[in-house]
Image (spheres, coloured by chain):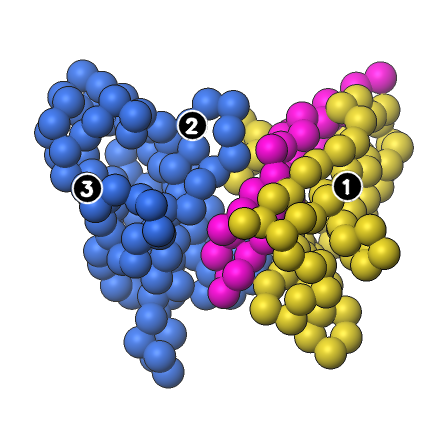
Chain colours: A yellow, B blue
Amino acid sequence: QVQLQQSGPGLVKPSQTLSVICAISGDSVSTNLAAWNWIRQSPSRGLEWLGRTFYRSKWNNEYAESVKGRIAIDPDTSKNQFSLQLNSVTPEDTAVYYCARDYQQVFDSWGQGTLVTVSS
Amino acid sequence: DIVMTQSPDSLAVSLGERATINCKSSQSVLYSSNNKNYLAWYQQKPGQPPKLVIRWASTRESGVPDRFSGSGSGTDFTLTISSLQAEDVAVYYCQQYYSTPFTFGPGTKVDIK
């Protein structure tokens, strides 16, 4: 049974970098059968897929256009986890951030969510 | 991007009655090579992450009660709860996984009348 445990600060100042980590148990970040995603949820934007990282002979990333240029999703094979970094945040980036595994492209395991507030 | 819409925004149903939620995609999510619809349904309760209920438009996840069923193809889909129970109160989202960016519907809130 896959479990995803999120950690990260809940408050970030405008223009700074949002960072959240997702620790994986019950699967490997290096598996070639799944991908590792970040999704956020806010009242104004609903559920919004941000991007994913996955290993298929080499590491790959896909990002949503809405955050491309500001986002990085990186695996950490030594700790079996992956991370989200979102740069130059504004109050519009305030949301609950979820990590999720996609197996056959459906999100079958989710982290508990991290409320990140962007405010000075 | 594929835009997902849902109707109604909310509904209230008596216990034991049927609840029906509709989802429409802006383009077909039916992949012709395998004849599969790349459409999933999720249930979200307050304070919890979404939970996968149905994949491939009509395949129930293990452990999901059989009162939940999905139907539809192409661009029009339906989630039906045949006999609403108190524990089914939640917001339900459809999601397409035909192409990135993966996109979700705005959600339908289901309550007890």
* Label at residue A21: 1
* Three-letter code for the amino acid on which mark 1 is drawn: Ile
Asked whether the viewer can see residue B62, the reply is yes
The residue positioned 34% from the left and 66% from the top of the image is B37
Q: Quadrant of residue A111?
A: top right
Above or below residue B113? Residue A81 is below
Query: Which element type, helix, strand or loop, lies under badge 2?
Result: loop
* Most common SS among magenta residues: strand
Q: Which residue is mark 3?
A: B67
Above or below residue A30? Residue A72 is above
In magenta stretch: residue A115:
yes
Q: Is residue B2 left or right of residue B67?
A: right
Above or below residue A4? Residue B12 is above
The residue positioned 46% from the left and 65% from the top of the image is B98
The residue positioned 39% from the left and 63% from the top of the image is B38
The chain holding disc 1 is A
For the C terminus of chain A, the quadrant is top right
* Label at residue A8: none
Q: Position of residue B108 (x, y in %)?
A: 34, 33
In magenta stretch: residue B39:
no
- The segment highlighted magenta reads A91-120
Question: Looking at the image, is mark 2 or mark 3 earlier in the sequence?
Answer: 2
Q: Which residue is mark 2?
A: B45
The chain holding disc 3 is B
Classed neighbour count for the residue bearing mark 2: other residues with Cα under 10 Å, few (<14), some (14–19), many (≥20): some
